[in-house]
Image: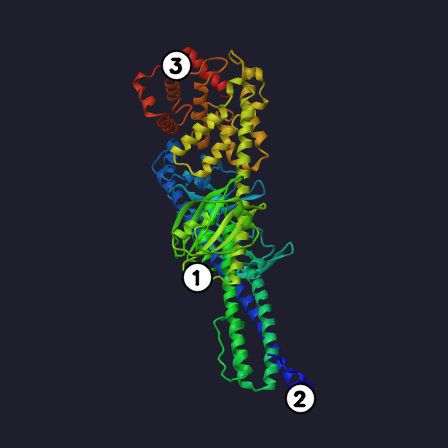
């Protein structure tokens, strides 16, 4: 419809026009400002509510753990009543056994006598201080006193005191130094906000993030509240909660403060502003258009259109306007309805497209990418079936086609397909192809869908590095329903699938390169001595087999592979003369040989990706009884991965030839490893390893038939330990 604007030459017409425009602009502008103000206020209010709840929950956790520690200390005190001072350490240790994790809750426990002498019961209490007369009186009521005291380095230590026997003060006072990590529940703190805890003097006890630079005056007098603070040109919103401790612990209160950056709180407002600007401009355009028509005609149709526009601006895209004026207003109403319908469909399409886009670009596994693409494609493009064919070969275009039906929960089948060279060249020349089944020359890659009843096909070629790498085939049974918009959506998804496919292949190549590099380095290390060729790879295989049988996760298996491949990397710094020496190593040579674990750790230390594998490199020569090296660790101090690697390493060393002896028979090697159970090796690991080696070999060696190692075998074990095998 062509608008006539000649009537605007009239002063009255222009006056009415500007009146309409101003009447529309002013309310919309005010609405924008009020909406922004209200949304900002609501976001801040909601943030303060969450921070308030987080501060309260943290306060309850701290109180609960203080009460738990109070109970533990009470149990210790009760257990000691009736015992003599000479039996105190054993009875206290027996009491500590009542709480299996008490050692994780406190760092030390002392018994302080009235003459200020101390008896250490557990761990170490770092600071020494005197209790006031009021605190001593409070303790005589069989209660506990909570004390904070500065300690090194630049920290605050927290102590919990209790009278050993309130009826007999001369027996002394139990003073426990609390482990702050347990008290604050650091592992379960929210990552979205920072949490700080202060004592009654404002001294920082704990802070997970930046500490507030100041407190409002009312924080010392009110139970809870909120405030804002800034630091390093950043603004924060914060809430505090005062935890009363006077009654149970003779301490006025601790203040728990939770804060969050204001930029995070108001982040949703940015998207709101962008959307509102678009709606604002659209509203202006519609108002101008409708005001011109209204001046020409009448106000009734304009009122309906204005009402519809207002609903659309509020996000109600289901809005439709009905005008039966039989003139241009009716046409305008139809155009408005068509526009709203298009906007609704377009927004829905963009939403689904973005969700598919994020899902396939964030995944590295080809199977997950294909499943996501195929299950959501029907929301954008009409289809009865879809097939995704992926070609991995460099020379021939052969591969598997994953076929999905259009159900809510698609059923997946697989078919082998092939694309000829002529077909490939024809496919890559166009962004998409329409094919109708109707002859015997149907391409091979369409036959699986044709067998499922499909007669119309939309084929989208997917190219990576200018080579056909995949096909996206949409099938329909009765017609060709695809509009130009549908084809464009299919093409865009094909392009995104190409990017995801390229990323997945690149990640696989990098993964292969990484393992190839580690294997090459391990072989280079083993090749330093002809006696250790392939040693690291065999140890890796044995260790991974043990870990699998023990039910370790895929991530832990990966850590063990890396660590075992590089467990002897430190032998780069060991002279060949020592590695290949036939006789017994002297003390100096043994010291040099044992340094290979620390040398290996220094070599691998700059590589962040190997940090989790470092215990294997450092600890695979540690013994369960503490007789190993380099640190003399024992029991659970030795990492499980290292205990697994120790068995695999020793087994391969025993059955392999060395310059100072021939490899042992399998049965004798297993018997020697068994004799190290509980001393050198973890019995659980040995049991699993024997199951892997096989019941036939294991059954031939009965415990009753064990013989002590001969002198030659004792020398073998000593040389294995000295040589770092």
* Neighbourhood count class around disc 2 (C-alpha, 10 Å): few under 14, some 14–19, many 20 upward: few
Where residue 363 appears, x then y in whole percent? 50, 48
Residue at 58%, 68% in the rendered image? 276
Left or right of residue 3: residue 422: left
Mark 2 or mark 1, whichever is nearer to me: 1
Secondary structure under badge 3? loop
Q: Which residue is mark 1?
A: 479
Residue at 59%, 82% in the rendered image? 293
Q: On the rendered image, what quadrant is the N terminus found in? A: bottom right
Is residue 222 visible in the rendered image? The answer is no
Mark 3 or mark 2, whichever is nearer to me: 2
**Mark 2 to mark 1 CA distance (whole Å):** 58 Å
Q: In the rendered structure, which disc, 1 or 3, sits on the residue that comes first in sequence? A: 1
Q: In the rendered structure, which disc, 2 or 1, sits on the residue that comes first in sequence? A: 2
* Neighbourhood count class around disc 1 (C-alpha, 10 Å): few under 14, some 14–19, many 20 upward: few
Task: Choose between 635 and 572: the one closer to the eye.
Answer: 572
Where residue 710 appears, x then y in whole percent? 40, 12
Q: Which residue is mark 3?
A: 709
Q: Which residue is mark 2?
A: 12
Q: In the rendered structure, which disc, 3 or 2, sits on the residue that comes first in sequence? A: 2
Secondary structure under badge 2? helix
Task: Choose between 466 and 156: the one closer to the eye.
Answer: 466
Task: Choose between 500 and 178: the one closer to the eye.
Answer: 500
Residue 179 lies, with reference to residue 291, above or below; the image says above
Where residue 690 appears, x then y in whole percent? 36, 26
Q: Are marks 2 and 1 in contact (CB under 8 Å)?
A: no
Task: Choose between 678 and 206: the one closer to the eye.
Answer: 678
């Amino acid at each position: 419809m062509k608008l006539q604007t000649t009537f605007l030459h009239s002063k009255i017409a222009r006056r009415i026009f500007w009146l309409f425009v101003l009447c529309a602009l002013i309310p919309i502008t005010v609405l924008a400002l009020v909406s922004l103000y209200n949304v900002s206020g609501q976001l801040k209010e909601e943030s303060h509510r969450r921070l308030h709840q987080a501060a309260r929950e943290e306060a309850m956790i701290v109180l609960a753990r203080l009460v738990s520690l109070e109970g533990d200390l009470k149990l210790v005190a009760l257990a000691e009543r009736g015992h003599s001072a000479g039996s105190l350490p054993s009875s206290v240790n027996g009491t500590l056994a009542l709480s299996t994790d008490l050692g994780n809750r406190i760092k030390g426990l002392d018994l302080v006598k009235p003459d200020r002498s101390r008896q250490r019961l557990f761990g170490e209490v770092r600071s020494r201080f005197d209790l006031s007369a009021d605190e001593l009186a409070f303790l005589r009521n069989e209660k506990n006193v909570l004390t904070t005291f500065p300690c090194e380095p630049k920290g605050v230590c927290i102590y919990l005191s209790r009278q050993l026997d309130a009826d007999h003060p001369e027996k002394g006072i139990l003073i426990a130094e609390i482990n702050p990590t347990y008290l604050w529940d650091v592992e379960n703190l929210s990552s979205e906000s920072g949490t700080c805890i202060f004592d009654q003097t404002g001294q920082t006890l704990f802070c997970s993030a930046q500490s507030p630079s100041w407190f409002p005056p009312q924080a010392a007098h009110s139970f809870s509240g909120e405030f804002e603070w800034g630091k390093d040109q950043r603004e924060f919103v914060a809430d505090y909660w005062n935890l009363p401790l006077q009654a149970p612990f003779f301490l006025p209160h601790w203040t728990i403060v939770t804060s969050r950056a204001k930029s995070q709180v108001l982040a949703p407002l940015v998207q709101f502003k962008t959307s509102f600007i678009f709606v604002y401009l659209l509203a202006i355009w519609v108002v101008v258009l409708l005001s011109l028509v209204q001046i020409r005609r009448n106000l009734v149709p304009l009122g309906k259109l204005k009402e519809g526009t207002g609903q659309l601006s509020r996000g109600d895209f289901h809005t439709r306007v009905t005008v039966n004026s039989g003139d241009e207003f009716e046409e305008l109403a139809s155009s408005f309805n068509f526009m709203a319908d298009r906007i609704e469909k377009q927004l829905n399409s963009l939403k689904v497209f973005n969700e598919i886009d994020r899902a396939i670009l964030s995944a590295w596994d080809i199977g997950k990418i294909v499943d996501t693409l195929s299950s959501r494609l029907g929301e954008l493009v009409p289809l009865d079936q879809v097939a995704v064919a992926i070609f991995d070969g460099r020379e021939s275009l052969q591969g598997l086609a994953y076929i999905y039906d259009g159900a809510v929960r698609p059923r997946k089948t697989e078919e082998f397909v092939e694309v000829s060279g002529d077909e490939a060249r024809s496919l890559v020349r166009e962004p998409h192809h329409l094919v109708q089944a109707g002859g015997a020359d149907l391409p091979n890659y369409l036959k699986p869908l044709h067998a499922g009843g499909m007669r119309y096909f939309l084929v989208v070629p997917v190219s990576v590095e200018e080579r056909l790498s995949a096909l996206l085939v949409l099938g329909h049974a009765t017609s060709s329903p695809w509009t130009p918009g549908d084809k464009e959506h299919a093409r865009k998804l094909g392009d995104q699938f190409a990017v995801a496919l390229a990323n997945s292949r690149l990640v696989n190549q990098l993964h292969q390169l990484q393992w190839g590099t580690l294997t090459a380095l391990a072989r280079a290390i083993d090749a330093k001595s002809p006696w250790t060729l392939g040693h690291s790879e065999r140890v890796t295989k044995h260790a991974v087999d043990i870990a699998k049988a023990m039910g370790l996760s895929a991530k832990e298996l990966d850590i063990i592979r890396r660590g075992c491949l590089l467990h002897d990397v430190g032998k780069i710094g060991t002279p060949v003369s020592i590695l290949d020496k036939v006789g017994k190593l002297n003390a100096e040579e043994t010291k040099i040989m044992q340094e290979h674990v620390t040398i290996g750790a220094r070599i691998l230390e700059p590589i962040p990706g190997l940090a989790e594998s470092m215990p294997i490199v450092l600890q695979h020569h540690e013994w369960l009884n503490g007789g190993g090296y380099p640190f003399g660790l024992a029991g659970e101090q030795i990492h499980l991965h290292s205990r697994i690697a120790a068995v695999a390493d020793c087994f391969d060393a025993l059955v392999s030839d060395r310059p100072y002896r021939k490899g042992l028979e399998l049965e004798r090697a297993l018997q020697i490893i068994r004799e190290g159970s509980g001393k050198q090796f973890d019995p659980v690991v040995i049991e699993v390893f024997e199951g892997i080696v096989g019941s036939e070999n294991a059954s031939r060696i009965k415990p009753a038939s064990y013989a002590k190692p001969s002198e030659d075998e004792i020398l073998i074990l000593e040389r294995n330990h000295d040589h770092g095998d």
